[in-house]
Image: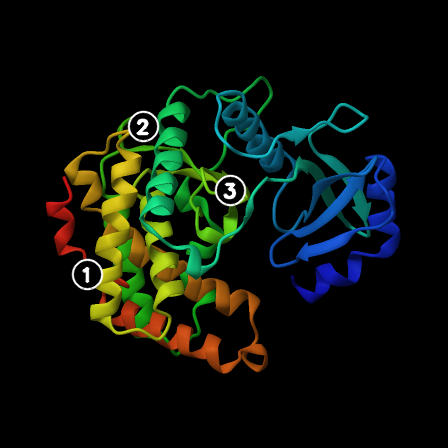
């Protein structure tokens, strides 16, 4: 979280939020990267409180996200329910100096966090199946009354690459802009493009052995469905082979995609042309992460592990390479 936001997020603000939602005073902080997340309690029942600063999302954007979450939940997707505040709102606003903090309350997802040791064919297949079901169901989604539609992918401020990339990284910037231009040329159809999570990596769901329970829809936007395949592949490969060779990553990627797509196709179908765009979206994730690190993590706070990742990302961007080679995708029909 930016230092300017941290200064505004006082104990007084947190206590106001807890009182508004009639929550117990004891809380457990879970995260604070782009949003503050807390495990909270209401009459002894654990719930999740998310608090967002207005510099990150507007109230309208948050209400739009929660409208879609409620739709998915009502259609049997295994995601946490949204709780309405005592004032009848999905999002409550709290003034802080010349800005706002927005609060929303969610059901705590069942299951447990996933570790690399949990990676296996069964999990990958379930992961794909839930993703495919989300895509299939969403094709019929229409925003509710007075709900502002979520933005499209190219409205992401992280794609203001000239602003976020270090000035000396001219080669990386030029290569990144070419990838974005290539994505912008892709055709948009109902079968290839829609509202999606965009960040279904293993840190954004719990697993109970039979299904996954997805959360953190903060980055949801209109994008190509293949993105929700590329992102799980990207982070799973990095998690499994952080310091791995290209061969190790390629072998893992083949195993992952085979099982993931088997599950996905039980619920939805993507054309071969859509699958072949996955490398583009692997590159896009590198491009956006490089911007994220420039925006969020000062040089003095980058440990050796993170520096290694950033250097790898930069090198791939400059070479116009994805984290894995996916020539084999044509054989995964």
The CA span between labels 2 and 3 is 20 Å
Are the two marked residues, 1 and 2, in contact with CB atoms closer than 8 angstroms?
no
Q: Secondary structure at mark 1?
A: loop
In the image, residue 61 sits, relative to residue 99, either above or below, namely above
In the image, residue 299 sits, relative to residue 16, either above or below, namely below
Q: Nearer the viewer, mark 1 or mark 2?
A: 2
Instruction: Residue at 58%, 24% (x, y): give it.
Output: 147
Q: Secondary structure at mark 2?
A: loop
Label 3 Cα crowd, 10 Å radius (few <14 / some 14-19 / many 20+): few
Question: How is colour applied across the structure in the image?
Answer: rainbow
Instruction: Residue at 73%, 41% (x, y): give it.
Output: 46
Nearer to us in this view, 128 or 185: 128
Q: Quadrant of the N terminus?
A: bottom right
Q: Mark 1 or mark 2: which comes first in sequence?
A: 2
Q: Nearer the viewer, mark 2 or mark 3?
A: 3
In the image, residue 154 sits, relative to residue 142, either above or below, namely below
Label 2 Cα crowd, 10 Å radius (few <14 / some 14-19 / many 20+): some
Residue that carries the numbered disc 1 in the rendered image: 325
Query: Count the marks: how many?
Result: 3
Residue that carries the numbered disc 2 in the rendered image: 267
Residue that carries the numbered disc 3 in the rendered image: 208
Q: Mark 3 or mark 1: which comes first in sequence?
A: 3
Quarter-wise, where is residue 32 in the image? bottom right
In the image, residue 221 sits, relative to residue 8, either above or below, namely above
Q: Position of residue 320 (x, y in %)?
A: 23, 65
């Amino acid at each position: 979280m930016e230092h300017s936001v941290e200064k505004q997020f006082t104990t007084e603000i947190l206590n106001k939020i807890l009182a508004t939602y009639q929550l117990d005073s004891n809380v457990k902080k879970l995260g604070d990267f782009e949003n503050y997340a807390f495990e909270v309690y209401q009459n002894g029942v654990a719930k999740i409180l998310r608090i967002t600063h207005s510099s990150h999302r507007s109230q309208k954007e948050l209400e739009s996200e929660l409208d879609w979450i409620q739709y998915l939940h009502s259609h049997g997707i295994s995601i946490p329910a949204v709780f309405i505040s005592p004032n009848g709102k999905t999002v409550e606003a709290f003034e802080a100096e010349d800005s706002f903090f927005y609060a929303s309350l969610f059901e705590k997802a069942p299951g447990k966090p996933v570790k690399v040791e949990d990676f296996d064919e069964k999990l990958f297949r379930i992961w794909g199946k839930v993703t495919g079901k989300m895509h299939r169901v969403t094709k019929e989604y229409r925003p509710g009354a007075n709900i502002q539609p979520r933005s499209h992918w190219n409205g992401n401020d992280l794609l203001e690459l000239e602003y976020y990339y270090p000035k000396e990284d001219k080669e990386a910037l030029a290569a990144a802009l070419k990838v974005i231009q290539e994505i912008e040329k892709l055709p948009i159809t109902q079968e290839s493009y829609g509202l999606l999570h965009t960040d279904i990596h293993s840190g954004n769901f719990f697993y109970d052995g039979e299904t996954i329970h997805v959360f953190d829809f903060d980055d949801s936007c209109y994008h190509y469905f293949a993105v929700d395949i590329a992102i799980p592949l990207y982070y799973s490969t990095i998690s499994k082979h952080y310091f791995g060779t290209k061969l190790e990553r390629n072998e893992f990627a083949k195993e992952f995609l085979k099982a993931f797509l088997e599950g996905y196709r039980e619920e939805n179908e993507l054309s071969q042309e859509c699958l072949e765009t996955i490398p583009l979206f692997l590159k896009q994730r590198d491009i956006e992460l490089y911007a994220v690190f420039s925006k969020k993590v000062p040089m003095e706070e980058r440990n050796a592990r993170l520096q290694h990742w950033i250097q790898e990302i930069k090198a791939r961007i400059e070479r116009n390479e994805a984290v894995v080679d996916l020539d084999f995708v044509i054989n995964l029909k």
